């Protein structure tokens, strides 16, 4: 493989890595704000705390990977510089957007972001395997699994959060439907 081809391959993988770093930081920041603001429905803090901790671990792993790759390449690449600048703007926008929403909508948005992280890691895993970058492929596979677990957890708490929110709006809610909704979710995925 020529040096130019190696550089192109590396830059391709690095662009996916930095996309994932930006997204993980976005999720981490948004969820941290939700945890901080979640007073009335504290029963939903546990899953959010776990999601935040997972994203924090992912960010650290991706930052360490990025640093190792930068050192091996002899400096910060164009792709890395671009990702850092996009993350700074994204984080501020995420906080402003998320804090104005009610709990069920926050959780819906979290699920959407986690789903995006899941599919992004699937693409990163695919790209890294295809281009024979085992270190990145393994990391993406691990993160993919974490996000699949988070999506499953979110599917269990979003209906309960929706019912809790509707009840807080003084609507006459029937909480007995939660078991039916749980069955609906299970059958949808089988």
Image (cartoon, helix red, strand yellow):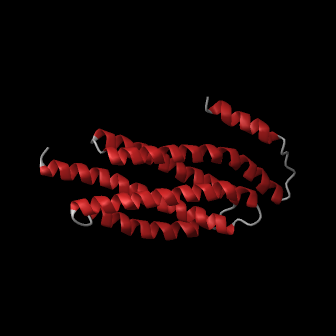
Q: Is residue 178 above or below residue 97?
A: above
x and y percentages locating residue 26 in the rendered image = 50, 62
Q: Is residue 154 left or right of residue 39?
A: left
x, y percent for residue 75: 24, 66
Q: Is residue 144 left or right of residue 155?
A: left
Residue 178 is drawn in which quadrant? top right
**Picture quarter containing residue 125?**
top left
Percent from the top left, x then y, of residue 121? 43, 47
Q: Which residue does the image show at 61% across and 67% down from the upper left?
A: 33
Query: In this rendering, would 182 be left or right of 9?
Result: right
- Residue at 70 percent of width and 49 percent of height: 157
Image: 173 above or below 25: above
| Rendered position, 169 above or below 185 | below
Q: Residue at x 61, y 43 (%)?
A: 152
* 89 with respect to 129 (left or right): right
Picture quadrant of residue 69: bottom left
Quadrant placement of the C terminus: top right
Q: Residue furthest left?
A: 2
Q: Work out whether residue 60 or residue 180 is closer to the camera in this orientation and state it.
A: 60
Q: Which quadrant, please, contains the N terminus?
A: top left
In percent of width and height, residue 89 lies at: 44, 70
Q: Residue at x 38, y 46 (%)?
A: 124
- How many numbered circles are shown? 0
């Amino acid at each position: 493989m020529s040096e130019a081809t190696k550089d192109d391959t590396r830059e391709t993988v690095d662009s996916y890595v930095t996309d994932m770093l930006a997204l993980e930081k976005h999720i981490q920041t948004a969820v941290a704000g939700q945890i901080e603001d979640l007073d009335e429905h504290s029963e939903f803090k546990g899953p959010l705390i776990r999601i935040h901790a997972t994203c924090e671990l992912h960010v650290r792993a991706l930052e360490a990977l990025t640093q190792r790759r930068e050192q091996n390449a002899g400096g910060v690449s164009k792709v890395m510089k671009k990702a850092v600048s996009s993350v700074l703007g994204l984080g501020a926008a995420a906080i402003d957007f998320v804090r104005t929403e009610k709990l069920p909508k926050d959780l819906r948005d979290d699920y959407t972001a986690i789903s995006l992280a899941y599919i992004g890691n699937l693409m990163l895993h695919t790209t890294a395997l295809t281009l024979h970058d085992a270190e990145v492929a393994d990391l993406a596979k691990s993160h993919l699994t974490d996000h699949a677990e988070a999506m499953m957890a979110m599917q269990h708490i979003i209906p309960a959060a929706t019912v809790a929110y509707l009840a807080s709006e003084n609507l006459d809610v029937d909480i007995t439907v939660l078991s039916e909704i749980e069955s609906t979710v299970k059958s949808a995925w089988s």
